[in-house]
Image: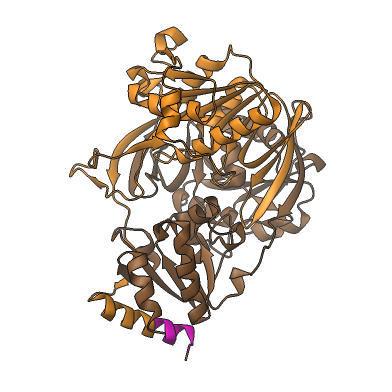
Amino acid sequence: MKEILVIAEHRQNELRDITFEMLTLADRTAGGNYTISTVLLGGDTTGLDGKLSGMCDRLIVMNDPALADYSADAYLAVLSRLITDRKPSITLIGHTAMGMDLGPALAVRTGIPYASDCIALELDDGQLNVERQIYGGKINTHLKLKPADTYLAGIRPGNVEPMSAGDKSTQLLDVAAPEFSEGQRRQFIEYIEAAMEDVDIAAADILVSVGRGIGKPENIPVAESFAQKIGATLSCSRPVADEGWLPKSRQVGTSGKTVRPKVYIALGISGAYQHQAGMKNAQTIIAVNTDPAAPIFNVAHYGIVGNVMAVLPELEKHF
Amino acid sequence: MNIVVCVKQVPEVTDAELTISSDGSRILADDLEMDINEWDNYAVETAVRLKEAHGGTVTAVTMGDEDSEDVLRQALAMGADEAILIDDEDFEGSDAVGIARGLHAAIKDRPFDLLLAGVQSADNGWGQVGLVLAELLQRPYASLVVDVQVDGDRLTVQRELESNTLERVSLPLPAVLTIQSGANTPRYVSILGIRRVRNIDIEETDADDLGLDEDQIGVKSSSVQELKLSLPAMGEGAEMLTGSVEEICDQTARIIREKGGLQ
């Protein structure tokens, strides 16, 4: 039977959520017509194997000290060999800091068609169709990849509700990694937890969160004053942190913090998927945005179409 | 340190209302403002700061029509020394590999120590071109870079990972880096600044000059074909609060009090 191959992702001895999301998507795409294999590269994956048991038909494990932490050169050498040898119908890789780093070079080295940041997949008689978003998530595009016997697809994280267990009988294949010591140019040094500058936004019951729609840094104190008045903590979306209007430690989202407050008040935040991934599990979400089509209204419970700076001073008077 | 930085002009869509034609074949939008791709702006700033600290030159390169000269002028005004415009309609419909082939052909004979690009573009968002270039150049690379330190003939960079975590890696020069937004604070470019660089010659080139044909670039070489466009599916959606500002704020305050457990 033909194969769908999932590249497992882990860091600091923990499998990343994207691994389970991809396995779920693989299972759905396979529809029983494809074998699902996972490849797990690491230094010592003993603690991780079991968590993948039942979720795929085959678990290919390669352990080597040089594969302990993700390294572009080593992963490229090992995975390009594996893909060339096995020719799976599709290889799934996360559109994550690891997969975004590895995917483009892997596709060029193996010479296979690659679509990154996919939100849906379909195998149409062996040919791959994908759906992805363009223009900051405002438009979806449906693409057909050119005929090939093997494809690489980068999968957007947080887009599939992952299964927590599976009932497949998983065959474990412990394989020696091929020789890859040559061409090791980039060296992993260490992980750094971003400094916690002042408060822990993940601990707040109520978050007042500001986005680009706040307009200018001079408006931040208006939101801060409102937050103080209602006993909330101030957080922000990526553009506000990128601009340096608030410290990075206040950023909600994939690369920042994941928060689950009782109330999340999104002020002028459009709601890019990376932001949604960090706040969609808040108990109540209230969003204020000038654009009625802003994606934030898809995850919000209550929406207000309007300018933050017009609404905020008025709202503060109600407390 | 000689640096090449890849830039792209993209439509500014943050505040734009985009719709699609009824047959789903094209995007309908009026008069979108064009601007330098946000990530590329951070890449140019990174390049100029490295030049200021270590000497050398910065060359900006873009692929696009004649209007793309604007992003090159912006890069020059920020401190780049030279600029290359690859202008040829034969590149239309190229995938990331086709674009990277054009950029590669334009810069491969130029001696450089470092090639920079933005992590991704705000329009198509493939996040591939810079890294495909690294593989074509057979150079070591790092993506999602937020900090660069030069240490002799090596770089130590910080990559942005998920969950408030960074990764420090080291790689030898010459190398390729893709720069993440927020890596620095790009300098402001005034109209006067643009005017000061208006007389700098921009090197123009095309597919023929670069020795590229339709098997390597453009629609024919592309590994993807667009079938149609659609608007993103709306979820259940929010309950929209309407009325006067006074009424809306009244309702909102009640919700915050109740759900937030406030008195």
* Residue B258 among those drawn in magenta: yes
**Could one spot residue A181 in this view of the protein?**
yes
- In the picture, which quadrant includes the C terminus of chain A? bottom left
Where does residue B172 sit, x and y in percent of width and height? 74, 28
Relative to A183, is B185 on the left or the right?
left
Where does residue A202 sit, x and y in percent of width and height? 60, 70
Relative to A152, is B213 on the left or the right?
left
Residue B134 image-quadrant placement = top right
* Residue A251 among those drawn in magenta: no
- Position of A237 relative to B35 (above/below): below
Outermost residue, left direction? B22
- Position of B77 relative to A172 (above/below): above
Chain A rendering hue: brown
Outermost residue, right direction? A65
Magenta residues, as a range? Answer: B255-262
Q: At x 38% / y 18%, what residue is drawn?
A: B87
Q: At x 64% / y 19%, what residue is drawn?
A: B112
Q: In terms of depth relative to the viewer, which is nearer, B3 or A274?
A: B3
Q: In terms of depth relative to the viewer, which is nearer, B4 or B108?
A: B4
Q: Which chain is orange?
A: B
Where does residue B232 sit, x and y in percent of width and height? 32, 53
- Position of A23 relative to A230 (above/below): above
Relative to B229, is A152 on the left or the right?
right
Q: Main secondary structure of the magenta part?
A: helix
**Could one spot residue A281 in this view of the protein?**
no
Q: At x 46% / y 36%, what residue is drawn?
A: B189
Where does residue A138 sit, x and y in percent of width and height? 34, 49
Relative to B240, is A239 on the left or the right?
right
How is the protein colored in the picture? by chain
- Position of A226 relative to B145 (above/below): below
Query: What is the tally of numbered marks visible in this picture?
Result: 0
